[in-house]
Image (cartoon, helix red, strand yellow):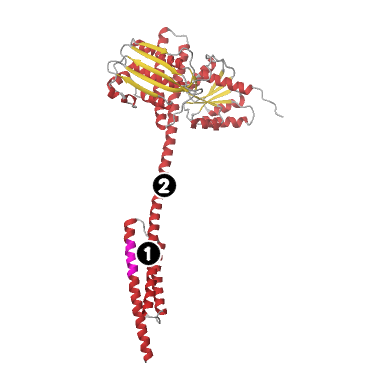
Amino acid sequence: MESVLNLIRETAAVITLWRLDLAVFLGIALGMAFRHARLRRRDSPDVPAPRRSRMLLLLIPLLGLGAAEGATHLMAGLPVLKSLGLRALLLVFTGWLFHERLARARVRGKVEQLSAHATGLAEELEKTRAGVASADRSKQEFLSLVSHELCTPITAIGGLTRALGEAGLSPEARNLVEHLAREEVRLAGLIDDLLDFVRLESGRLELRRAPFCPVEAARQALGGVATTAEAKHLELRFEAQFSEPLQLEGDEARYRRILGALLDNAVKFTPKGTVSVLMSWAEPQRSGGRGRLCISVEDTGPGIPAAQLDRLFHPFGTLNPAHNREQRGCGLGLAVSRRLVQLMGGTLTCESQPGKGSQFRVELPLPQAAAASAAPVQIQGRGRILVVDDLEANRLVVCLGLRRHGFEAEAVASGEEALASLAHTRYDAVLLDIHMPGMGGYETCRRIRQMEAGGRRTTVIALTASISRQTFGRCVDAGMDAQLQKPLDFARLCKLITERQAESEAPRPNRR
C-alpha cells in the first residue's frame, strides 16, 4: 500500500512539474509567435508566410514539449533543484531555436517579397523595352515609306522639269518652266526639312563624309535665293577671306541646306538693303586635325528682340505667325539647321538688335581634304542599263538621264518583268527601285543572283529615298552592289556605273 502511495505521489509530482514546464514553454512560444506575427505585419504585410516556415514553427514547440516530457521522466529520480535547472535550460534552448526560426522566416519572407517585386519590375521593363523596340521599328518603317513616297514624285518632277528646260521652248514656256523648277526646289527643301527633323528626333540621321568645296556650295546656296532677292531689289554679297581653293570633307548636301535656310530666312524677312555672306577658315592646329570654317550671314532687316532669339530655333516656332503666313514656311528651317550643325560638332548662334538687322554665325570643325578635287568632267558612258521602277514618270526620267550620258536604257515596271528581261538579254547594270508592289527590290535582287549561279555578275544598284544603315544593310544582304539616294545625281550615277564596268572588265591574275 505504501509503495502505491509513493508511486501516486511521484506521478503527481511529475505531472505538476510537466505542467509547469508546459506552462513556461507555451508562454515563451506564444510570446515569440505574437512577436513574429507583429513583425511580419510591419515589415512585409503583403507577403504570406512560407508554408515550410509555418510547418517548422509548429514542429519546434512539439519537439520542445516532447523533450520536456522526456526530461521529466528521466529526471524523476534526481533532486528537484537539478531537475528544474535542466528543464529550464532545455526550455531556454528550445525557445532560442524558436526565436532563430522566426528570425529566418522574417528574413526569408522579406527576400521573397523583394524577389517578387524585382521579378515584376523586370517583366514590366521587358514589356516596355519590347514596346519601345516595336515602336522604333514601326517609326523607322514609316519613315522609310514616307521618304520613298515623297521623294519619288519629287525626283520625277525635278527630272521632267530639267528635261523640259533643255528642250527647245519659247521664251514664255521657258519662263514657266523656270518658275516650276523653283517651286520644285522649294518643295524638295521642305520635304528634306521634315524628313531630317523626324530623323533627328529619332536619332537616326547619318552624315556623309566626302570632299567638297565650301565656296562653291555657298555660291549654289546664293543662287537658290537670287531670284527672290532680285524681285525684292535686295543686294546679295559674298566674300571668302582666303585666296587658295579650299577642299574640305563633310556632308555637302546638308552644309548647303544649312546655308540655304539661313539665306532664305534673311531674304524672306529683309524688306530692303543687303544680305551678306562672309566666310573664313582657320587652319588645323596639328597635321590631320580639324580646322574651323566660319560663315556669317548678315542682313539689314528689322532685327529681333533679345527676348525672342531663343524662339528662332524652336521647331515650328515663329516670331510673328501672321507675317510668317504671308512669307510661307513651316518654321523648321532654323530648328533643323541648328541640330544639323550640332550633329557636325559646331555651333549656330544669332545676334540681333531691333532696327539694325541680324547676324547668324555658323562655326563647323571640318577636316581638310587630302588634295583638291579636279573640276567635274562630263562622263559619257557606254553599255546597256535596265531600269526597274513601278512609276512610269521615274522610268522616263532615269532613262532620259542615262541616254544623255551615252548609255542605252530600257525600262520595266516590276521585278517579274526584270527577271524575264534578264533571262534573254545581257545588261551591264540594273537600276532597281526598292519599294515596288508585288516582288520588291530586295527579292528581285536575290532572284537575279540565283539566276546567275556563279556566272557573270551583273551590277545591281539600289534606288531609294532612305540612306539609313538598316536600308544599306538590307541592300548588301540582298546582293546589291551599291545604293543611291533619290533625287538622283546623274553624274554620280554614271560615274558609279562606269567604275563598276571597269572593275568587271579588269583582267584577273591567274591562280596556279
Mark 1 sits on what residue? 99
- The numbered dot on residue 122 is 2
Q: Nearer the viewer, residue 373 or 286?
A: 286
Q: Nearer the viewer, residue 166 or 123?
A: 123
Secondary element at image label 2: helix
Magenta residue span: 27-37
Q: Is residue 216 visible?
A: yes
In x, y percent, where is residue 456?
63, 27
In the rendered image, which quarter is residue 74 located in?
bottom left
In x, y percent, where is residue 7?
38, 86
Secondary element at image label 1: helix
Asked if the magenta segment contains residue 45, the reply would be: no
In x, y percent, where is residue 179?
39, 13
Q: Is residue 81 left or right of residue 249?
A: left
What residue is drawn where x is 39% and y is 47%? 121
Vertical placement of 505 versus 42: above or below?
Answer: above
Vertical placement of 239 versus 348: above or below?
Answer: above
Q: Is residue 45 visible?
A: no
In the rendered image, which quarter is residue 336 located in?
top left
Instruction: Give me the C-alpha separation between circle 2 and circle 1.
Output: 34 Å
Q: Amino acid at mark 1?
A: His
User: Are the two marked residues, 2 and 1, in contact with CB atoms closer than 8 angstroms?
Assistant: no
Asked if the magenta segment contains residue 32, the reply would be: yes
What residue is drawn where x is 37% and y is 89%? 4
